[in-house]
């Protein structure tokens, strides 16, 4: 494949295909083809403009095309060029590059692609190492649900890998056959945006990456480079698919679907939202229970998932706290303490049974850094509301 074609695929096709896959995973239509036709019409602004006859004609054409592909699928296979890709201003050393998976879809099995009996690999480790990995997995979004035998299988299958400074671990667009958990060191994540490689985030001890290619059978969504010597734990595709995948996809899809409805996060692309979904923790509060208290140290950012809450604030010393704001699903709070490194500016109390998605300080800075300007503007709006309340 030529460099021009690869640039086009990375800049145009991959973002479009990710949107398509995200829409399918969220709505899970029984008939994907008609759903996609309607989805495309909505995206293009053509919804309602085609007659039923025209739609039927389009469907027949597409079915005929797909049938032809099925009948002659083996003739359509093409081997890709051995020409090496280059990533501008990025190191070129890559760990085990593969460049053959170009489709974006969940792994499917049937008579044409039978799922073989799973025989997990076992990589010997000391008892202390296994205990350490068990603790590391318990703190990770993707593995926290594992118990007993399943957790043991994953621990035994993990392999330690070491990378030098500026060594490329994965490259955007490559095939992906394993995910990684950072044991020590740090790494930088780059993504090609408008033809340029943009630094979008950093990874440190305890973070995981590389799972998108395994979850959706898709090319690597970003490039990850070691920022100094680092040690990673890798998990192979087969073990991930058999032990981890289903639970991870269900939870991620649930949170990604919710995050698309949060106005603050509307500018995030699907990749960024999926990364945010991975680190959110669900917390529940009973009606009347305090979520945060004025004057306390604040290290968590909250998004209301279900229920309602009120913000109260002591406006004058010696007086009771007064209500200044109300929160419902999709609203957020707790950002002031994280932005300004100050104590909590108000109380937030559940006014009904309440469920919130929580983001710790480290993840807040790492994932919501680009949104900090918006948060600061909204903070000024909050201060205006408080000032009005003080004048009453």
Image (spheres, rainbow, N blue to C red):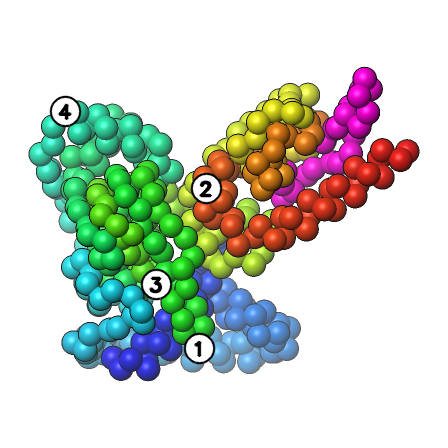
State left or right for residue 195 relative to residue 146.
right
Seen at 70% across and 37% down, the residue is 327
The label on residue 60 is 1
Residue 367 in magenta stretch: no
Span of residues in magenta: 310-333
Residue 179 is situated, as x and y percent measured from the top left of the image, at 26, 48
Seen at 79% across and 41% down, the residue is 385
Could you give the CA–CA distance between mark 1 and mark 3, rounded to whole angstroms? 24 Å
Relative height, residue 249 to residue 220 (above, below): above
Q: Is residue 33 visible?
A: no
The tag earlier along the polypeptide, 1 or 2, is 1
Residue 91 falls in image quadrant: bottom left
Q: Nearer the viewer, mark 2 or mark 4?
A: 2
Callout 2 crowding tier (Cα within 10 Å): few <14, some 14–19, many ≥20: some
The label on residue 127 is 4
Per the image, the residue denoted by label 2 is: 363
Per the image, the residue denoted by label 3 is: 104
Residue 147 is situated, as x and y percent measured from the top left of the image, at 29, 27
């Amino acid at each position: 494949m030529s460099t021009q074609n690869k640039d086009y695929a990375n800049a145009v096709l991959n973002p479009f295909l990710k949107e398509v896959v995200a829409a399918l995973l969220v709505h899970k239509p029984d008939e994907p083809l008609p759903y996609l036709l309607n989805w495309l019409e909505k995206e293009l602004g053509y919804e309602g403009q085609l007659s039923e006859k025209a739609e039927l004609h389009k469907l027949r054409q597409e079915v005929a095309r797909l049938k032809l592909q099925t009948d002659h699928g083996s003739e359509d296979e093409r081997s890709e060029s051995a020409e090496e890709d280059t990533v501008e201003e990025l190191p070129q050393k890559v760990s085990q590059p593969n460049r053959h998976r170009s489709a974006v879809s969940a792994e499917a099995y049937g008579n044409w692609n039978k799922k073989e009996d799973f025989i997990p690999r076992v990589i010997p480790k000391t008892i202390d190492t296994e205990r350490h990995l068990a603790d590391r997995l318990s703190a990770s979004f993707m593995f926290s649900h594992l118990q007993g035998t399943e957790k043991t299988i994953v621990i035994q299958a993990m392999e330690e890998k070491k990378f030098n400074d500026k060594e490329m671990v994965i490259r955007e667009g490559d095939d992906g056959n394993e995910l990684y958990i950072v044991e020590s060191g740090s790494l930088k994540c780059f993504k090609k945006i408008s033809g340029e490689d943009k630094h979008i985030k950093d990874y440190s001890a305890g973070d995981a990456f590389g799972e998108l290619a395994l979850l959706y059978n898709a090319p690597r969504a970003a490039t990850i480079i070691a920022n100094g010597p680092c040690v990673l734990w890798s998990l192979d595709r087969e073990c991930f698919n058999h032990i981890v995948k289903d639970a991870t996809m269900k939870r991620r899809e649930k949170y990604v679907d919710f995050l698309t409805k949060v106005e603050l996060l509307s500018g995030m692309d699907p990749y960024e939202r999926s990364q945010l979904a991975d680190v959110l923790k669900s917390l529940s509060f009973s009606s009347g229970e305090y979520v945060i208290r004025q004057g306390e140290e604040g290290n968590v950012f909250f998004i209301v998932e279900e229920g309602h809450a009120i913000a109260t604030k002591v406006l004058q010393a010696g007086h009771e706290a007064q209500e200044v704001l109300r929160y419902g699903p999709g609203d957020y709070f707790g950002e002031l303490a994280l932005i300004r490194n100050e104590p909590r500016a108000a109380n937030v109390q559940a006014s009904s049974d309440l469920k919130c998605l929580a983001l710790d300080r480290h993840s807040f800075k790492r994932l919501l850094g680009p949104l900090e300007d918006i948060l600061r503007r909204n903070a000024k709006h909050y201060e205006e509301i408080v000032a009005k309340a003080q004048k009453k």
